[in-house]
Image: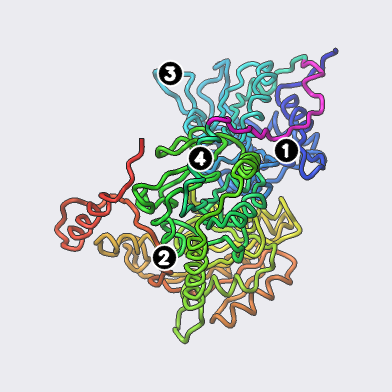
């Protein structure tokens, strides 16, 4: 077979254009687009290659390297890891801006391809602009900072290297167990070099995500233990959704009478009113799921990495509870003495159902789940009920927005007080319509992810809920969505600062300090006019005075032709109950009696923790 004479950058781009994936029987581009900010290190070579294929591989200009990579992650979530966006930066500060986003993708097991410019391999012009020099190791550049937060890392120092590197990067991003961000450092002198690439390197390739089957022995052990359970509990994690196992797991839970709760990443596995559903579990969970977790004798954890917000820092379960962990990643499956069933969630649950026979959970336990969840729903109705209070609570705001949202609208949030409030108060109407990024809890994810989600599926509207602190941290993709025509509804809840961290500070005996604006070192507290700011970026806006106004405003926002921003003042001190215990560091000695009391309570709580091995 012949060769094609291309620069390294041109060859890289041509390879990406020829990678495809199957989605519901359709062949779609594996890489449907690129987010890029061009600068020193990528504007002359990589941009030249991308411009030539702009109608095949669209390039979208970002406003901030971090946010455009977060948009790529939001896109990956919305497509359930079936498609992968690319984020490109220049060298130096542009590259480093993407490190935080890489951490988000790495923590949440999400694919994104990060391409950053790099300094010269030949070192002839060193030091170049934006080059950080390491005196003892000249091979080190800022791009080495990506190593701890990527699943695949490579620096291309010869144009031929992409022939082996790119397929490996794709394989990692599509692997259900190793999935995460892939990073390639692209030195600018290597980008320009022309090479004779084999034509077969560019042959169209259709990728499918592998579905590893579980080991027979571990599955048999899991079945034996599950059959002994009188009080089993299913925890559905994000891996259920990425596997496409929602329907199979929902039917499994209903068929065998097993209560099903959800992690933060797993919320949206089932609809709120599914017969087996008992609510979210853990620190931002429901009283219903947490009550059942405390009594469960066997916990079937499916597609979850069992982070502390799910396990109540490992205090949410009985010390005698046995864990069965179904996970494509061995690392996650092996946690906390679980029977590790390493395999795809969809295929493993199918095999589990085939082998479990006529097993049923104790009917009294199934009924207990129904009753606890019914009580939780009554409590939610109370928390969300409008009152005459001058400032509405988060629960009331979430309840109104939820009631006006269309069935397929996707709710997006990530940091501050809203994750806990939407986890508890948002009643999912259709599967896969909920995205709360809380693996990394990255402030700034929300608006960018809304852009990515709108791009991934223009038939539904992202509803992004954020606090005033998050708005101030990263808001520029309001402008991006207006520029590109990807609409979202953004709801800003202004509670005067970092209210949920102030809550934690107070709960552990600390005085309010440097969180709410009024408690910061400022000349004079004042409220930002978020709406005027959003209007300056082209968004439509409406100020909301009351809960009644909020309902009307959401309905109006559904009819607009572009990103629409609503702002409402909200309560900084009222939170929906249901939490589990959480392990955080508390000073062991302090001049404040409140801190000393909190430290004593924390030590008592730690006595209940399940010890991992």
Gap in angstroms between the C-alphas marked 1 and 3:
35 Å
Q: Residues within 10 Å of mark 3 (few under 14, many from 20)?
A: few
In the rendered image, which residue does mark 4 sit on?
224
Q: Residue furthest right?
A: 1
Q: Is residue 172 left or right of residue 610?
A: right
Q: Compare marks 1 and 3 and give the one earlier in the sequence.
A: 1
Q: Is residue 132 left or right of residue 240?
A: left
Q: Are marks 1 and 3 in contact (CB under 8 Å)?
A: no
Q: Residue furthest bottom?
A: 388
In the figure, 9 relative to 35: above or below?
A: above
Q: Which secondary structure lies at badge 1?
A: loop
Q: Compare marks 3 and 2 and give the one earlier in the sequence.
A: 3
Q: Compare marks 4 and 3 and give the one earlier in the sequence.
A: 3
Q: Compare marks 4 and 1 and give the one earlier in the sequence.
A: 1
In the rendered image, which residue does mark 3 sit on?
137
Q: Is residue 346 left or right of residue 59?
A: left
Between 598 and 429, the residue placed more toward the observer is 429
Q: Which secondary structure lies at badge 2?
A: loop
Quadrant of residue 124 within the rendered picture: top right
Task: Please state the horizontal and vertical placement of residue 529, each as a whole percent of the image.
Answer: 52, 70
Q: Are marks 1 and 2 in contact (CB under 8 Å)?
A: no
The answer to if 205 sits in the magenta stretch is yes
The answer to if 27 sits in the magenta stretch is no
In the rendered image, which residue does mark 2 sit on?
578
Magenta-colored span: 197-217
Task: Please state the horizontal and vertical placement of residue 566, each as a whole percent of the image.
Answer: 59, 71
Residue found at x 65% / y 28% = 171
Q: How many marks?
A: 4
Q: Are marks 2 and 4 in contact (CB under 8 Å)?
A: no
Between 156 and 425, the residue placed more toward the observer is 425
Task: Please state the horizontal and vertical placement of residue 123, each as a whole percent of the image.
Answer: 54, 17
Task: Please state the horizontal and vertical placement of residue 75, each as a whole percent of the image.
Answer: 66, 48
């Amino acid at each position: 077979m012949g060769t094609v004479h291309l620069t390294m950058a041109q060859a890289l781009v041509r390879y990406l254009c020829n990678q495809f994936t199957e989605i519901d029987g359709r062949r779609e581009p594996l890489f449907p687009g690129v987010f890029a900010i061009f600068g020193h290190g990528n504007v002359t070579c990589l941009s030249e290659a991308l411009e030539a294929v702009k109608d095949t591989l669209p390039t979208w200009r970002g406003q901030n390297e971090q946010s455009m990579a977060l948009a790529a992650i939001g896109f990956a979530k919305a497509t359930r890891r079936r498609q992968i966006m690319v984020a490109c930066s220049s060298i130096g500060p542009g590259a480093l801006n993407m490190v935080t986003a890489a951490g988000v993708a790495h923590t949440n097991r999400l694919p994104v391809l990060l391409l950053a410019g790099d300094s010269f391999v030949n070192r002839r012009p060193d030091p170049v602009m934006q080059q950080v020099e390491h005196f003892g190791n000249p091979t080190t550049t800022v791009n080495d900072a990506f190593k701890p937060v990527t699943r695949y890392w490579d620096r291309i120092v010869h144009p031929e290297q992409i022939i082996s590197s790119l397929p490996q990067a794709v394989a990692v991003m599509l692997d259900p167990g190793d999935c995460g961000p892939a990073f390639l450092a692209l030195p600018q002198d290597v980008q320009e070099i022309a090479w004779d690439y084999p034509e077969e390197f560019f042959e169209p390739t259709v990728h499918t995500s592998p579905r590893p089957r579980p080991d027979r022995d571990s599955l048999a052990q899991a079945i034996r233990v599950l059959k002994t359970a009188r009080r089993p509990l299913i925890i559905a994690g994000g891996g259920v959704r990425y596997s496409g196992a929602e329907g199979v797991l929902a039917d499994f839970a209903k068929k065998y009478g097993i209560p099903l709760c959800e992690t933060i990443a797993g919320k949206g596995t089932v609809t709120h009113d599914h017969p087996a559903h008992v609510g979210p579990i853990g620190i931002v969970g429901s009283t219903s799921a947490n009550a059942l977790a405390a009594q469960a004798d066997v916990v079937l954890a499916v597609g979850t990495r069992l982070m502390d917000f799910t396990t109540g820092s490992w205090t949410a379960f009985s010390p005698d509870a046995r864990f069965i962990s179904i996970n494509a990643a061995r690392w996650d499956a092996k946690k906390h003495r679980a029977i590790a069933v390493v395999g795809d969630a969809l295929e493993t649950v199918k095999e589990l159902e085939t082998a479990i026979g006529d097993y049923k959970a104790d009917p009294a336990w199934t009924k207990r789940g129904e009753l606890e969840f019914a009580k939780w729903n009554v409590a939610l109705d109370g928390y969300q009920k409008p009152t005459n209070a001058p400032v509405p609570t988060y629960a009331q705001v979430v309840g109104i927005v939820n009631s006006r949202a269309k069935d397929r609208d996707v709710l997006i949030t990530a940091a501050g007080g809203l994750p806990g409030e939407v986890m508890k108060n948002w009643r999912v109407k259709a599967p896969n319509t909920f995205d709360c990024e809380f693996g990394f809890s990255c402030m700034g994810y929300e608006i960018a992810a809304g852009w990515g989600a709108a791009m991934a599926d223009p038939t539904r509207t992202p509803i992004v809920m954020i606090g005033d602190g998050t708005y101030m941290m990263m808001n520029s993709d309001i402008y991006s969505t207006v520029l590109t025509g990807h609409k979202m509804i953004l709801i800003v809840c202004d509670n005067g600062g970092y209210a949920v961290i102030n809550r934690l500070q107070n709960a552990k005996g600390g005085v309010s300090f440097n969180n709410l604006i009024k408690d910061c070192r400022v000349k004079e507290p004042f409220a930002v006019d978020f709406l005027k700011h959003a209007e300056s970026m082209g968004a439509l806006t409406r100020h909301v005075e009351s809960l009644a106004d909020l309902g009307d405003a959401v309905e109006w926002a559904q009819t607009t032709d572009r990103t629409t921003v609503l702002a409402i003042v909200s309560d900084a001190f009222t939170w929906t109950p249901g939490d589990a215990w959480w392990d955080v560091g508390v000073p062991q000695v302090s001049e404040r009696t409140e801190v000393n009391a909190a430290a004593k309570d924390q030590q008592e709580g730690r006595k209940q923790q399940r010890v991992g091995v």
